[in-house]
Amino acid sequence: MTAALFESSISSLPLIAKGKVRDIYAVNEEHLLIITTDRLSAFDVILPDPIPGKGKVLTQVANFWFEKLGHILPNQLSGIAPEDVVKPEERDQVAGRALVVKRLKPLPIEAVVRGYLIGSGWKDYQATGAVCGVALPAGLQMASQLPQPIFTPATKADAGEHDMNISFDEAKTHCADRLSQDLWGTGKNGAELCAQAKDAAIALYTEAAAYAKGRGIIIADTKFEFGIDKAGTLHLIDEVLTPDSSRFWPADSYQEGTSPASYDKQFVRDYLETLTWWNKQAPGPKLPAEVISRTAAKYREAYERLTGKPLAL
């Protein structure tokens, strides 16, 4: 396995932003370079130890879905090779883990789709019988499959804060308030684009969940992000149906009424919960080698189960 990349250091392009996992550079006025590092965050804290290969898993899973779901709506991919926009000595930092994408205006919501009742949705249902204002049948259990997938948007939180679940009507208002009423003269407004995003998110989830189930994976829920170009066309952006943006459960061990194991950083969360001395504030604690290796293996397994191919590291 190649060495882990905790932080990129591309000197040939200006750095625009550095998130919990991704480093973003400007290529030109039309394109961005997004590098998915091996950083891992838990409880909104970036941990000091990277997970080797994690960034390549996330990038290659997203590429798989971009290709598979491209007939539903356009996506951010530009077709430009990341190796072509950096210096030769910087190519090892982008190989297999970076994308050159179109510059698009993002919608100011997280487009969450739930097919199963878990996480904050389960808590909401226990308290109200609904999730984000969507009424559900009585008597559902933890991890129950919903009668049909539901759209449960959330606001995008600032760094260090948590996203806030909102209703679809609140999401339309949120988009209308934060996007110009007539985007670039296209005649489209934020509320209309939010409605379009809802339909696209449900369609994307439905097709992906059906495919994944045939590969032995249940996609319990997922988060999409959308952006628009200057023609007002909605695009699928950011990461798509990865173990970081979705709950992937092994279908063969799924049991209604319990919280299933996930193909993600659950090993890390479980370990951190044993550290009574850590207050879940930065700086994060170092991870044991076993936790790192088991987490890396789970990410790789998710890719290989979905695609039926070994991961190219």
Image: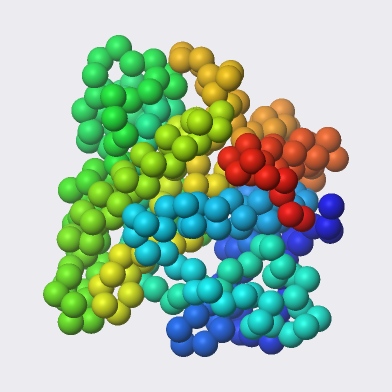
Question: Coloring scheme of the render?
Answer: rainbow
At x 83% / y 57%, what residue is drawn?
2
Q: Quadrant of residue 62?
A: bottom right
At x 33% / y 16%, what residue is drawn?
140
In this view of the protein, which residue sits in the foreground, 311 or 260? 311
At x 33% / y 21%, what residue is drawn?
126
At x 56% / y 28%, what residue is drawn?
216
Q: Quadrant of residue 304?
A: top right
Can you say which quadrant of the picture contains the C terminus?
Answer: bottom right
Whether residue 290 is visible to the viewer of this picture, yes or no, is yes
Residue 277 in percent (x, y) is at 73, 35
Residue 246 in percent (x, y) is at 50, 42
Residue 115 in percent (x, y) is at 37, 32
Residue 278 drawn above or below residue 225: above
Relative to 293, is 218 on the left or the right? left
Whether residue 282 is visible to the viewer of this picture, yes or no, is no
Residue 252 in percent (x, y) is at 58, 20
